[in-house]
Image: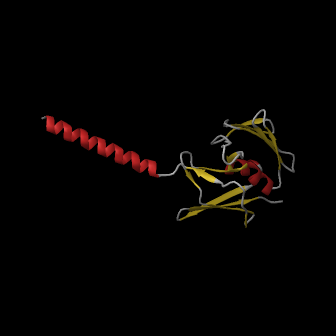
Amino acid sequence: MLKKAVNTLLFSLIFFVTVDQANAALPKYLYNLVIKVNNVEVTSDANPYIERATNTTYVPIRFVSENLGEAVNWNGEKKEVTIRSKDGKTVRLTIGSKVAYVNDQQKILPSAPVMPVSPNRVMVPLRFVSEVMGATVDSSKKDETLYVNITKAN
């Protein structure tokens, strides 16, 4: 009886350690991204990434906004970034908050903007920022790479 209990305990420990290690093998982030704006590949000084937990593609705020022709301002005291478009639209995002303001109207983001220590950049959900600025986002996956094209008429 004791031998059976010990065998069951050992099996359980091995099983759970194996399952836990399999889950730990998946990286938290995926960095294989190719991003284009109006069919022209663009690069950034900080790597865009996909957060696997929320399946959200994050990019540096200046990367997406300035490539769409928008102006970006940073308020370090409030930890708030403001995007101003050529057509007068204003978007305010705060680090760690899923609440954004588009022309002072509250919108809920799928994931909050973040500011990791490395890189020291405000990272925002690509699709939300692009679409709120009037762009269309198309994506496709091949192998382990995600291809994203952001299209916006000038």
Does 99 sit left or right of 5 as displayed? right
Does 73 sit left or right of 26 as displayed? right
Q: Position of residue 6 (x, y in %)?
A: 20, 38
Residue at position x 59%, y 52% in the image: 50
Q: Is residue 134 at all visible to an observer of this figure?
A: no
Does 99 sit left or right of 50 as displayed? right
Q: Nearer the viewer, residue 34 or 119?
A: 119
Q: Nearer the viewer, residue 92 or 134?
A: 92
Q: Is residue 36 at all visible to an observer of this figure?
A: yes
Which residue sits furthest front?
Answer: 118
Which residue sits furthest left?
Answer: 1
The quadrant holding residue 10 is: top left
Q: Nearer the viewer, residue 136 or 74?
A: 74
Q: Position of residue 107 (x, y in %)?
A: 71, 38
In the rendered view of the protein, which quadrant contains the N terminus?
top left
Residue at position x 25%, y 44% in the image: 11
Q: Position of residue 14 (x, y in %)?
A: 30, 45
Report how many numbered discs are placed on residues in the image: 0
- Here the colouring is secondary structure
The quadrant holding residue 69 is: bottom right
In the rendered view of the protein, which quadrant contains the C terminus?
bottom right
Q: Position of residue 129 (x, y in %)?
A: 72, 48
